[in-house]
Image (spheres, rainbow, N blue to C red):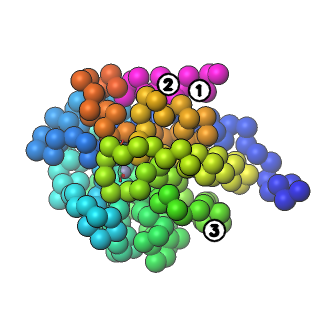
Amino acid sequence: MAEQTHPAPQPDGHRNPVQISPSILSADFANLAAEAEAVRGADWLHVDVMDNHFVPNLTLGLPVVESLRKATATPLDCHLMIEDPDRWAPQYAEAGASSVTFHVEAAAAPVRLARELRAQGARASMALRPATPIEPYEDLLPELDMVLIMTVEPGFGGQAFLDVMLPKIRRTRRLIERHGLQLWLQVDGGVSATTIERCAEAGADVFVAGSAVYGADDPSAAVAALRERAESVRRA
Ligand code: DX5
Ligand code: ZN
C-alpha cells in the first residue's frame, strides 16, 4: 500500500487545540477597535483582504492592518484574497500580522513566499479555493504552518457552507498526519453552530466565523459556543 511508504502517523497530529478566528468582514468597519474588543477570548482576529481582482469584492489593506495591530492585543490572521501575493504578503507580516495566508492559485513562487513569511516571524499559510485540490501541493506542506480550506467561494461573508469540501478537509488532515507535521488546518466560509462539528470531525482545528459571530447578539458568547461545539467533537 502507498501509505506504508510514508512516516508513521502522529497520534497527536489532529490534537492541535481548537482555535476560533472571528472574521471582521462581518463587523462594523467604522468601529473596528470596538469590534475587536467584542470578541475578546478569540484566539485570532481574521482579516479578509480583497483586491477586487482575485475576488469580486474590495475590503481593506495595509494601513487598516497597521492600525488594527495597535488597537488590539489579539493576533491578526490575515487572509489575502489578492493577486500577486508574492509582492504583497510580506508587507502584511511587516504590518504586524502574526499569520499570513496567501492563495496558492495566485502565488507565483509559494515556497519562496512561505519562507519569506517565516523569516519575518509570521506563520505562513496557504489557502485553496473550493475547486483547487490539495494533492498537487503535498510536497509543500513542510514549508507551511497552516492550510486554509475554503468552504465557500471566497469573496463574501454570509454564504452557505459547502458540504462537498468535507472530503478535502479529511484528505488534507491525512496528508498532514502522514508527513508527521504539526500544521494547523483552517476552514473558512459558512462555519456556524450547525456546521462547525462537521468541520471538526473532518479534521479542522482553526475555525473562521464571520456572520455566525458578528451576527450574534453577543459575539464573545458566540465564540465560546463555537469553541465548545468543536471541542465536544474531540471528546466524543
Ligand atoms: C470569505 C471570507 C470569509 C468570510 C466568512 O471570502 O474569506 O472569511 O468572512 O464569512 P462567514 O463566516 O459569514 O461565511
Ligand atoms: Zn477569510
Tell me residue 162's x, y (percent).
Answer: 49, 47
- Few, some or many C-alpha atoms within 10 Å of disc 1 (few <14, some 14-19, many ≥20)? some
Give the numbered dot on residue 229. Answer: 2
The answer to which of 163 and 122 lies nearer the viewer is 163
Res. 51 image quadrant: bottom left
The residue lying at 54 percent from left, 58 percent from top is: 144
Quarter of the image with the C terminus is top right
For marks 1 and 3, give the CA distance.
Answer: 30 Å
Which residue is located at x 61 percent, y 66 percent? 137
Q: Give the residue number, with chain letter if any, for mark 1.
A: 233
The answer to whether mark 1 is within 8 Å of ligand 1 is no
Residue 169 shown left or right of residue 22 in the figure = right
> Circle 3 — which element?
helix
Residue 210, horizontal then vertical, whole percent: 32, 40
Above or below — where is 21 with respect to 155?
above
Q: Quadrant of residue 106?
A: bottom left
Pointers 2 and 1 in contact (C-beta within 8 Å):
yes
**Compared with residue 165, is residue 114 higher up or lower down, i.e. above or below?**
below
Q: Which residues are magenta?
A: 223-236
What number is the disc on residue 15? none
Disc 2/disc 3 C-alpha distance (Å) = 32 Å
Q: Is residue 84 magenta?
A: no
